[in-house]
Image: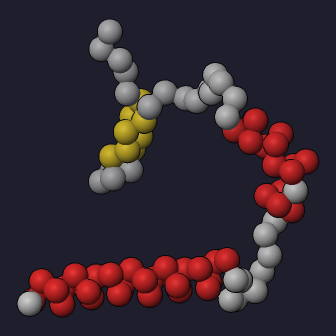
Amino acid sequence: MTAGYIAGSLVGSFVIAYMCDTFVSDKKAFGGSIPKTVSDKEWWLPTDTKFQAWPRTAGPPVIMNPISRQNFIVKSTE
């Protein structure tokens, strides 16, 4: 009996969360609009190809020491 209440509450909370998310983001409850770079296919396709392009270039991996706020470059052991 208690498991039924817990399961029902979980399902109900997910439904409420989904409805609130849809209302705020898709229906634009607080105003705003979708940027042209996302809604326009002429912008979207070159942007997507740029982000999916390989090889990607980046610096070496870095570990941050939060106490002294120093960054250390991780060297490979090979």
Residue 22 position (above or below residue 49): below
Number of numbered discs present?
0
Residue 35 position (above or below residue 4): above
Q: Name the residue at the left extreme.
A: 1
In the image, is 41 to the left or to the right of 23?
A: right
Query: Which residue is pictured at 64% across the width and 22% down the height?
Result: 55
Residue 73 position (above or below residue 6): above
Query: Which residue is pictured at 49% across the width and 79% down the height?
Result: 18
Color encoding of the figure: secondary structure
Percent position of residue 46, x then y: 83, 40
Percent position of residue 47, x then y: 79, 43
Closest to the observer: 72 or 54? 54
Percent position of residue 36, x then y: 86, 62
Q: Please tell me in which quadrant of the rendered image residue 31 appears.
A: bottom right
Closest to the observer: 26 or 48? 26
Closest to the observer: 73 or 26? 26
- Picture quarter with the N terminus: bottom left
Query: Which residue is pictured at 53% across the width and 86% down the height?
Result: 20
In the image, is 63 to the left or to the right of 32?
A: left
Percent position of residue 38, x then y: 79, 58
Q: Name the residue at the top extreme.
A: 78
- Picture quarter with the C terminus: top left
